Image (tube, rainbow, N blue to C red):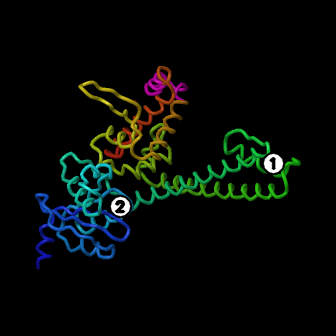
Amino acid sequence: MTQTISNAEVHTLAIDLAKTSFHIHAADRSGVKIHSKPVNRSKLIQYVSNLQPCTVVMEACGGANHFARKFTAMGHTVKLIAPQFVKPFVKSNKNDAFDAQAICEASQRPDMRFVSPKDTAQQDIQSIHRARSLVVAHRTALSNQIRGLLTEYGIVLPQGISILRRSLPSIIDSDNRELSILFRELLQNLYSALITVDQQVESFNQKIELLARQDERCVRLQTIPGIGPMAATALVATLGDGSAFKDGREASAYLGLVPRQNSTGGRSTLLGISKRGDQYLRSLSIHGGRAVVRTSPKHNDYRSNWITDLARRRNVNVASVAVANKNVRTAWKILQDGNNYLAA
């Protein structure tokens, strides 16, 4: 009976996520603790399902989106908080109980910013991007190792993985006497591994392009100059419908594309971009902006003239970041309103 009454009074439930052992901190409407206890993973779903609809708060970490979908289906309101916003509320030493209490206290701040939970479609897109980035990093490491080994035999190749890919067969079949049979066999194995990794990257590219054609939001985002299938799908996976941000600048700030401040005494000092948030998506956005800057002198519209003038006054990198910032803001507006991109 005591447990039933306690569950009925729960207004905010903070959960410190882990692999097997979780810690929950339940509070009433006034923020007063009702109970705090550890819960096993196998019993967490059952415990939350027995609660009346309440606000469930978790850190935005591994597994948070899975539980957010589960708890939302039960009728609860789920909020995710970035870990860096929870840390200031941790009292004394760090343990699971204090972490859960800090999550509960942080969620009750009136100006707290929350992370929008991802649905299954967003999770699928993000998973493909994460897997592709891992394979691309492996390909880069493999190509660097091949270049390092060739350097020890006096063979130095220009930069570019395409040059390495074209040059390896001729190096393996060359009449260079410094290359032993053993080393040629090694190069052949590494070359075969490189081709296999290339095929994996191409497979991921095809999946992303297919998703970009099938998703109506991605189709509209690709009409923005500088946003292709990669950036469009990554934006949809990260921003969703844009409801988690009050405006485009907040979305851009979430990706670290706005200036970092170091202001005091009423004097504003703006530094370089903050580089916060998703580094992968920020990189895609800036690469897309760099492509727009490179082709802007060929056009005579208002946007291209602004980009060309900015690149001339500052430099190409500043102009590329400015274009990325503007593209993210435009993408947020398109996702928020459902309209198409209209050039100025």
In this rendering, would 118 be left or right of 206? Answer: left
Q: Position of residue 51 (x, y in %)?
A: 19, 71
The quadrant the N terminus occupies is bottom left
Q: Position of residue 50 (x, y in %)?
A: 21, 74
- The residue under label 1 is 171
Count the numbered circles shown: 2
For residue 120, which quarter of the picture?
A: bottom left
Looking at the image, can residue 341 be seen? Answer: no
**Secondary structure state at the residue bearing disc 2:** helix
Q: Nearer the viewer, residue 303 or 243?
A: 243
Mark 2 surroundings: few (<14), some (14-19) or many (≥20) residues within 10 A: many
Report the magenta residues as a range.
295-310
Circle on res. 65 = 2
User: For residue 80: magenta?
Assistant: no
Mark 1 surroundings: few (<14), some (14-19) or many (≥20) residues within 10 A: some
Mark positioned earlier in the residue sequence (2 or 1): 2
Q: Is residue 296 above or below residue 281?
A: above
Looking at the image, can residue 327 be seen? Answer: yes
